[in-house]
Amino acid sequence: MIDLPALAQACGLLLSDWRPWVVVPPGLLIGLVFGAIPGLSAPIAMAVFLPLTMSMDFLPAIMFLTSVFTGGGFGGAVPAVLMNVPGTSAAVATTFDGYPMARQGHHSRALGLALAASCFGAALGYVLLLLLVDPIAEAVLLLGPLEMFAIAAWGLTLIAVLNEGSFAKGLLAGILGVVIGMIGMSARGDMRGTLGMLALIDGIPRIPALIGFFAASEMFRLMRNDFLVADAAHRRPQFGAILRGLREAFAYPGTLLRGSLIGVGVGAIPGVGAAVANLLSYAETKRRAADPAHYGRGEPRGVVASESANSSSEGGSMATLLALGIPGGSATAVMLGAFAMHNVTGGPRFIAENKDIVYAIILGNLAQVVLLLGIGTLFLFGAAALVRIPVRFLVPSVLVLALLGCYSITGTMAGPVTMVACAGLGYWMRQNGYPVAAVVIGLLLGPAAEAELLRSIQISGGDPSFILTRPIAMVILLLLAASLLYPLLRRRGTRRGGGTARAAPEAKPLVRRDEARNESA
């Protein structure tokens, strides 16, 4: 629990020194901009500006880096909503409903929903970190490869959830994603699918592939339109609509809470991170929905579920960094570098000896969330003006930025070539009814599931009874089975109660506002 004397000392550290607060607003803005540019991300921004922290004291340096982290965590939602371009892999699920809302002229509302959900998720994540930093660290140590495999497998089940049309096409798309993800050196050290090309030894670059499947392929489809939003009356930025979106997010408290808790739990696991958290949250929200046909067509709860999870995962990843000295992802790995630059080593000893500083970092991050709400709202008002740019100017600009971003990630032409190849494949899939999202999910989670399964087999010696000694893995797998069976059982109960299955109505593009107020999850 909270050490009250240390908490009081932390408040004194933050209130007695103005330097930590000077660096927070610029850090948030840097994170927003880097997160909103396809191909760039918060970890890249943190790495670029890391040398600046050498001249700072430890607390201002970490406050600056965490503000970039917080801003970038939401920044990826901006292109995801406006252009179907996930700014980061943690914003993939945001595109599923955010972009359809934008095409219907509700881009300002969708951006407001995303900002409110991000701020709520990040705040809840840091509150839980403040209360449970030590227990979270102990729980993470109990997770092994089998538990990691169960979580990755849970994420892969989203492929089944996303199938709105042919199940066979969705399954084939998911398998294709897994196969693409298997290219390169396997966890056993075997070479697969490289065709003798050295550039493929490390596998297909994931972020360029993701940008190609989502961004570039959608840009090709948009070329036949004049504007992103067909109705001219809906193109101008609407500050009132952003504020309505901010309020509307809290009409779904169950979705907000569930997504935030999933984000904290998944974010605390090293190597998993927000990319899995937002997919899991979206999958569970859609499975539990009474009207799953609305998802993927502009359902506000889909945006809320995704953004609350990927932002709350920040608190979980910070828990492993502070309590164990283990980075949960690339962003916290950069922070670990900042720790080293200031001769600080994270871990149980660091918390025991510097609890006031740990609490100061967490309280500072909570304050950043409040500042993000104000700075992010103003940022969104400017970003929403993107829909007023004619497509003939927008498409080449986005493609050039995406190509430059892909080159900056890989440092070679492998990034741009991967983006172009995946763009062509993604465009063909869209034209023929194959879900592009299923390919991306297989690409992101398939190799992770394979690697953790291999480690589990090596540890157990191939004995299936090994699972009986891992109660946490058994619980996760049981939850996975329940989440898959629940929709089937509910449909069967509906058929029995109604005599015949009622055909799914034509999905409305958006849930009505009066329904949104009454919906709690």
Image: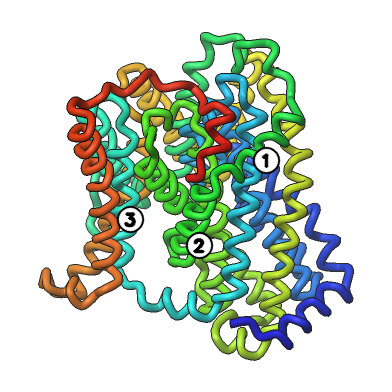
Residue closer to the observer: 40 or 446: 446
The tag on residue 264 is 2
Tag 1 secondary structure:
helix
Residue closer to the observer: 477 or 317: 477
Structural distance between the alpha carbons of marks 1 and 3: 31 Å
Frontmost of labels 1 and 3 is 1
Q: Is any part of residue 195 visible from this angle? A: no
Q: Residue at x 59, y 36 (%)?
A: 404
Tell me where residue 463 sits by quadrant. bottom left
- Contact (Cβ within 8 Å) of mark 2 with mark 3: no
Structural distance between the alpha carbons of marks 2 and 3: 16 Å
Tell me where residue 477 sits by quadrant. bottom left
Residue 29 coordinates in the image, percent (x, y): 75, 47
Q: Residue at x 47, y 40 (%)?
A: 92
Give the amino acid at mark 2: Val
Q: Residue at x 74, y 26 (%)?
A: 238
Tag 2 secondary structure:
helix
* Residue receiving disc 3: 152
Residue 392 coordinates in the image, percent (x, y): 62, 13
The tag on residue 185 is none
Residue closer to the observer: 390 or 192: 390
Frontmost of labels 2 and 3 is 2
Query: Horizontal placement of 504 versus 209: left or right?
Result: left
Tag 3 secondary structure:
helix
Residue 451 coordinates in the image, percent (x, y): 28, 60
Give the amino acid at mark 1: Leu
Residue 48 coordinates in the image, percent (x, y): 68, 55
The tag on residue 246 is 1
Give the amino acid at mark 3: Ala
Q: Earlier in the sequence, mark 1 or mark 2?
A: 1
Structural distance between the alpha carbons of marks 1 and 2: 22 Å
Other-residue count near label 2 (Cα within 10 Å), few / some / many at <14 / 14–19 / ≥20: many
